[in-house]
Amino acid sequence: MSFEDKGTGAAGRKIVNLALQGGGSHGAFTWGVLDRLLEDERLSFEGISGTSAGAVNAVVMTDGLAAGGRQAAKDALRAYWQKVAALSSRGVFTPSPFDKANPDFGLEHSPGYLFMESLTYFMSPYQVNPLKFNPLRDLLAESINFERVRRQQAVKLFISATNVKTAKVKVFNGKELDVQHVLASTCLPLMMHAVEVDGQYYWDGSFTGNPAIFPLLFECESPDIVMVHITPADRPEVPTTSPAIMNRMQEISFNTSLIREMRTIAYLTRLIDAGKADGAKRLLIHLIEAEDLIRKLSWSSRLNGDWNFLTHLHGLGRARADKWLAANFDRVGVETTINLEEKYF
């Protein structure tokens, strides 16, 4: 593939890479973003890097593109999230009527959630679930044609997981993906057994790459990366309750690797601007974020799969993507559209 003038392709179409964060049910915001971006035929997608829920969105979208193009990708994403809602309605994390009436979409009045949350304090998934029951496995197998994903050449696909033994990020290439790889990227250690892939064991990729940016740097030609950021890095208040503290600890750990990569990109950009990095590739970073929206939600809403909540997030994602396109499309392929120093330093 050849790229004209910094990521601008034939007939003025602009070629971008996508970087999709994880966040449980909050990934429905990313669904909304992708739904809107797929409608804009001025954009093409070269590579997608995703983690956890971002990995699922990435693989479902890729499968749809391979099956029938943009509309098929939109349909596949909607069908997947509908199945999430149907599965959730039969699961232990079903929101109570009180939860459904709460604007923060939490599960604090859900008996199943309260029971499982308390259980995680003193029992591991190896004790609670010795048979490794995981409904997500069947959902992924039903929703995604992995053979088609491995064969497709529509986009370059990368999903991240965390090696439990080495603490290193593992990036799986689209040409090798199966259900186990996606399960590895989405594995929450307090709720699921570590996922084995080729003799190694993995937890959620958010610990080490949320999402990993470096595959898009080294494996893709387009310099433009559109990142969908849904895990709050900044919160104005200091948490004082045990659940709030644990939530904040996870948010920090889920953002650390991304912040480090963004700082490296900012430093490399300064070197390029100073003429001290001849031959280095300049990345152009763009951001569609939900941090301010997610901060208003309960921590437990990450496990809320109610259809009304998912479509609420989907609508917010579409609106944010629409706003981003209106403000920044002309700058794609030309310049970074966020202040990296302000955002990540």
Image (cartoon, rainbow, N blue to C red):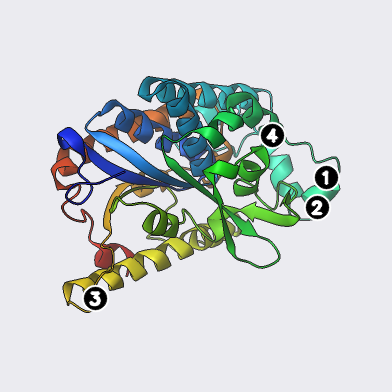
- Indicate which disc, 4 or 3, sits on the residue closer to the N terminus: 4
Q: Is residue 271 left or right of residue 35?
A: left
Q: Which of 161 and 113 is in front in this view?
A: 161
For disc 1, the marked residue is 128
Question: Residue 226: where, in percent of width, then height?
Answer: 32, 47
Q: What element carries label 4?
A: helix
Q: Is disc 1 surrounded by few (<14), some (14 to 19) or many (20+) residues within 10 Å?
A: some
Q: Is mark 2 on a helix, strand or loop?
A: loop
> How busy is the neighbourhood of tag 4: few (under 14 within 10 Å), some, or many (20 plus)?
few
Q: Which of marks 2 and 1 is nearer the N terminus?
A: 2
Query: From mark 2 to mark 1, how far is it between C-alphas?
Result: 7 Å
- Cα distance between the residues tagged 2 and 4: 22 Å
Q: Which residue bears the numbered disc 3?
A: 271
Q: Residue at x 37, y 45 (%)?
A: 18
Decide: few, some or many residues near mark 3? Use Cα within 10 Å; few <14, some 14-19, many ≥20. some
Are the two marked residues, 2 and 3, in contact with CB atoms closer than 8 angstroms?
Answer: no
Residue 137 disc label: 4
Query: Mark 1 is on which residue type?
Result: Val
* Disc 3 residue type (three-letter): Leu
Q: Which residue is drawn at 69% across and 53% down?
A: 189
